[in-house]
Amino acid sequence: MTDDLPSSRTGDADSDDADDALTTDGGEAIRHTHKSNRDWWPDQLDLEILDRHAGDIGPMDEDFDYAEEFENLDFEAVKEDIEAVMTSSQDWWPADYGHYGPLFIRMAWHSAGTYRTKDGRGGASGGHQRLPPVNSWPDNVNLDKARRLLWPVKRKYGRKLSWADLIVLAGNVALESMGFETFGFAGGREDDFKGDDAVDWGPEADWEMTSEERFDEEGRLKHPLGNTVMGLIYVNPEGPNGEPDLEGSATNIRDTFSHMAMNDKETVALIAGGHTFGKVHGADSGDNLGPEPEAAPMEKQGLGWENSFGEGKGPDTITSGIEGPWTSAPTQWDMGYVDNLLDYEWEAHIGPGGAWQWRPVGDVLPDAAPDAHIPDEVAEPMMLTTDVALKKDPDFRAVLEEFQEDPAEFQASFAKAWYKLIHRDMGPPERFLGPEVPEETMLWQDPIPDADYDIVGEEEVAELEDLIVESDLSIAERVKTAWASASTFRHSDKRGGANGARIRLEPQRSWEVNEPEQLESVLATYEEMQAAFNDSRDDDVRVSLADLIVLGGNVAVEQAAAAAGYDVDIPFEPGRTDATQDQTDVESFEVLEPDADGFRNYLGGDYEPRPEELLVDKAELLSLTAPEMTALVGGMRTLGATYGDSDRGVFTDEPGTLTNDFFVNLLGMDDEWVPVSDDERLFEIRDRETGAVEWEATRFDLVFGSNSRLRAISDVYGADDGEEQFVHDFADAWHKVMTNDRFDLD
């Protein structure tokens, strides 16, 4: 977490909205700005975030299997190569203290540290630190150099080692190279080749700005945001709004780290452990840094922040604008940071880089550190406002004192917190690759037990299907329950899904969107069905509730398709097991509760985005394309699978029959749409001639007629010859959602 605050103060977060072309007219340069659709119509619903699921835009072919490639690595040789790079200082970017370890720790930390719990986006997966906007964030000044230093390793191993894995592994190797024992490392992060446009980084239009819009009425970060400042990973190291406010800084630290699912102990461990190494860079306070990588001239070849102060590197490096080391041994794991922070008094002052930082005061001062580049010179240790805030806050200080009294606990806490930081977005351990994956599964990894019984086969599945059909559960009830269970999945951090049947556990069992009373009744029926089936067996074959819930939804869809005259067979892959309440972190799962669910036409309470934007966001987290989202909404409506069994959006006289009526009645011109709520969330569809109310609807419904792209898809499904395609597309999309979390099937 070194060098958290950049000194580059320029950059517009929205600068990529238009294409600029430079032409000449009579020798005079003229810049033409070509407006995109978004420039012309800024309120247009953004569906492009769904296009990433329509096909791979990277260079790898369909048969490429990164897991297989990674497992063929000589892992120890990779680590040796990384350490060789780390300890070989290059003239073009000299290493502090002759060791790039602290720089690589910062690189790995800033890659993983963008993760936030609310939507699971950010994090190290995808290697987004090398793509805009993250590659040009002010907080990532000079990390472009860290990645270039690692290019020889990446070049050597090619497709066997993704940038996403290499960046994080380099951080681990750096810690080990400087005497720290890490908890483990897992590979498996595939590279993306385009930045994630689905991430909302905040409302500000300029880097390093903090607006009131970023916080709620209680002063906490609004969901899904995880950082308090635009373009910074966490918080401003000088203090809130660049002022050395210790109490405010502690509040911001606790808030932003909680959005990464870190408690106080983990937060202190990460900051103290990370700041045990390296230094911050603020050689000068002038405006010396050039444009960030995305704005740099072509000849810079993707390198940004050219420094015009002195030689622009080594002792003249400018990164955060803060200058100095934390300890006397910046490339060694020890207790130096904790001891310096607790044992000495610190005062705020403006450092050589023009930023607020803290220096020791009193008759006894901490040991000086060697200068990072100049032989026989020394440097006085410093602290950031965010460091001293840990000492000021009573709860954070208690953790610091515990670590000081028990260095082994400090080591263990940092090891586990670091492991959590760099793996939080990777999902369950079954996705983890490599020889250093720990045997232990942590609670934050949402453990699911292995089956201690034989899984049902085709014969047993057929028997269960008969039991489901004979039950008193309606098609809508079965569809809603299966959807509620499976649709918690989000591809961003591979959490949620039907496996584990956590729909029957807290907190999901009590979510308003899941209609707790109705859910209780449905689950009771499934539990009776499960008990009857399992008790009837004289062998070891058993069915889990997780499998039964999904199978019930599949059978319901097949029945509804048959009622419309179509033979649909949705594949069913048994093997899900049931998690326990003890295996479920209630607080961690609460963030998966949807504010709204357009698929069930659930509007929820107060929220800022337009409902249709939340629908698209949910679809993106489910890895859906625009056609898949369209088919699912239309199908859920005709199945009558709406929140509260409402008629809103159920544009059919035959609910429970999988027809294309939703699209037929949506697109016709015999009716008109009329808003009937002040917030224009609710509408009535009225006969143009009589004024009679034909249907009720929400924005979730209307968007499929109002948005040009969605209407173009709806046109296909609503045509006289479109129903069969719609039914099969719905079934395929349904199966995709039901199996999103079945990583064992990959």
Image (cartoon, rainbow, N blue to C red):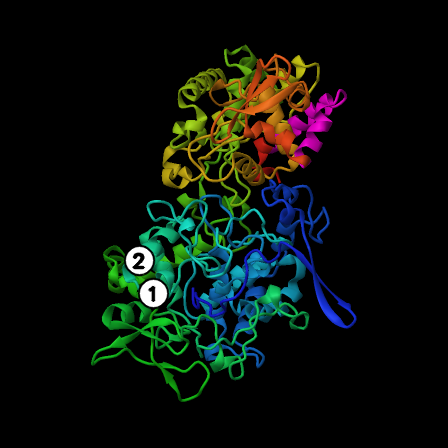
**Picture layout, residue 559 above or below residue 381:** above
Q: In which quarter of the image is the C terminus?
A: top right
**Which residue position holds label 1?**
243
Amino acid type, mark 1: Glu
Residue 247 at what x, y percent from top left?
Answer: 28, 59
**Which element carries disc 2, helix, strand or loop?**
helix
| Residue 543 visible from this viewpoint | no
Q: Give the range drawn in magenta.
A: 709-736
Q: How crowded is mark 2: few (under 14 residues within 10 Å), some or many (20 or more)?
A: some
The mark nearer the N terminus, 1 or 2, is 1
Q: Nearer the viewer, residue 456 or 631?
A: 631
Q: Is the magenta stretch mostly helix, strand or loop?
A: helix
Is residue 268 a member of the stretch shown in magenta? no
Q: Which residue is drawn at 52% across and 32% down?
A: 487
| Residue 681 visible from this viewpoint | yes
Identify the disc placed on residue 248. Answer: 2
**Picture layout, residue 34 above or below residue 616:** below
